[in-house]
Image: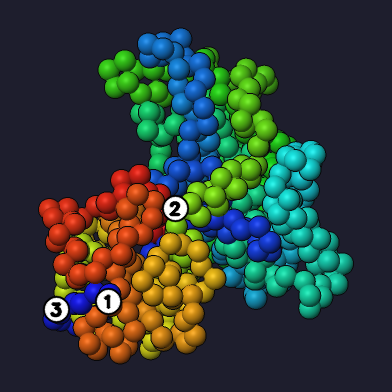
Amino acid sequence: MLAHRNIILLLQLLTFLGFVHSQPGSGGLHGDAIEAQCLAFFRREQIRIPIALEHVGGPSTGSGNNQVRLARHHIIPVRILINFFNSAVQRNGEHNTVLGGLMNLMGFLSDDALTHYPGSSSLREYIRRDLQDMRHLQTLYVMDSVTENSPPLDVLFSSDYLVRSVYQWMPANIFIGPEPQIRSDDPGDQFEVNSRYIIGEENFQRLDTLRRLMISYVDTGHLNEYNEAIELLSEISRGRHSPYSYSPDQWEYNSWTRKYNIKTTSNNRRKRLVENVVVETVEEDPNCLIPIETVKISIENYNLMIVAKVLERAKKNKGFYDKSSHSSWKDWYADSQWQFGIYGDGISMSGEGWIYKAYGYKFADNSFAVGILGTDAKNGKDNWVNMKHDFTDSAGIRDYAGQVFFDKNGRPVAIVITSNAWGQAGSGWSFIYNNGKWEYESTDSWDERRFAGRTESLDSEAPRFLMD
């Protein structure tokens, strides 16, 4: 039975970013999410947080059981790496040599990654295939023999390809330490200044120089700074094949705050020659690639494959518009009519309206929404696609449209979708996310009935999506 909705006020759109997943046989890994491989889905000022690797022995001054959960930490933050990469790709039209430098860098990065995962069982076959394809394309590019059948360069360097994962998880820019939640000195998405006490002064100065060159190139576009950055980046990445490992004697534990921090005493500021502790998980997966499979399975099991796709679409296009005039997704839903606020805006938000690029809205409490189309459900397996109506048979782009709501923590809340005809009649379909799947709601009052006094997702264990 179709849900009925009778409310007023014509308002507009909504949008959000992307989650990541890999898909065997897709010809590429969805990897804006490099972060998705070794990062948990938590908000932290537009950066993902490393997920803990395992429990290992902590500093001698540590907590009672002397155990600490470890994570991978970037020294040059992901934000700077992404900005540099994107600027180089965007400016290739100005200087063809820009892309040439990236191609050379990615060529040996893929070589290194393949070398460090010996044996066919070390990497999923589709991950290995992507690495090999990337290396092959680099060879063709250098030989000036790229063919029409080769992956387009803009695809190679898009967020849909493994290349970004290899680049953003270069072991030489990663050290292992207590996870961010239990660090008092964690810098968020800023440069890890105290890493000099972990990696040694010489290595630190090289990374700091690289960071400055990257920032300067993004700001100025000067080709000489780009070339210096690529050369240093290549040298640094080639010089190390595993992250800087965890050493308890380089960390202090504060019993008052119950948090860890890097020791900054002078005797700890040394040239790093010996790796004291080997974290097996890291040594087996230095480039942070293997967990991609886990992420993919997780998304499928959570019935969020389609949601991930429409979020990525919004992120890659117009991004999010501020809609702080509405306190939350719940306030927006209450003010939206089926025909206009849900269907009409859903069309526009999905990039099929006057603005031919997808976008979304962010509300006052940081909850958000994106557009969704019936055609997004084609070949989809998420449990809502044929629950009360078979959206997998959607033929035209404008047949069905609606929106996906996310709470302030980035967890999925609901999908509301309708057709133009049913929208005019004040009707549509509502699906609420709960316990890892979507539940059909036959009435429009589900927002007050099931979310009385709250705006958070009913599934407190659902994956958390990020707006950037």
Q: Hey, which quadrant is residue 388 in on the image?
A: bottom left
Q: What residue type is labelled 3?
A: Ile
Mark identifier at residue 7: 3
Mark 1 vs mark 3: which is more N-terminal? Answer: 1
CA gap, disc 2 to disc 1? 24 Å
Is 65 located above or below residue 91 in the figure? above
Q: Measuring 56% from the left and 45% from the top, which residue is drawn there?
A: 294
Q: Hey, which quadrant is residue 162 in on the image?
A: bottom right
In terms of depth relative to the viewer, which is nearer, 177 or 303?
303
Mark identifier at residue 2: 1
Q: Is mark 2 on a helix, strand or loop?
A: loop
Q: Do tag 1 and tag 3 residues touch (Cβ < 8 Å)?
A: no
Judge from the rendering whether residue 239 lies leftward or rightward of residue 47; answer left or right. right
CA gap, disc 1 to disc 3? 16 Å
Q: Can residue 228 be seen in this view?
A: no
Q: Measuring 72% from the left and 70% from the top, which residue is drawn there?
A: 151
Q: Do tag 2 and tag 1 residues touch (Cβ < 8 Å)?
A: no
Residue beneath disc 2 = 302
In terms of depth relative to the viewer, which is nearer, 62 or 197?
62
Q: What element carries label 1?
A: loop
Judge from the rendering whether residue 408 lies leftward or rightward of residue 213; answer left or right. left
Is 129 located above or below residue 149 in the figure? above
In terms of depth relative to the viewer, which is nearer, 178 or 378?
378
CA gap, disc 2 to disc 3? 31 Å
Q: What residue type is labelled 2?
A: Tyr
Image quarter in which the C terminus is found = bottom left
Judge from the rendering whether residue 108 lies leftward or rightward of residue 294; answer left or right. right
Q: Crowdedness of circle 3 by 10 Å Cα count: few (<14), some, many (20+)? A: some
Is 118 located above or below residue 82 in the figure? above
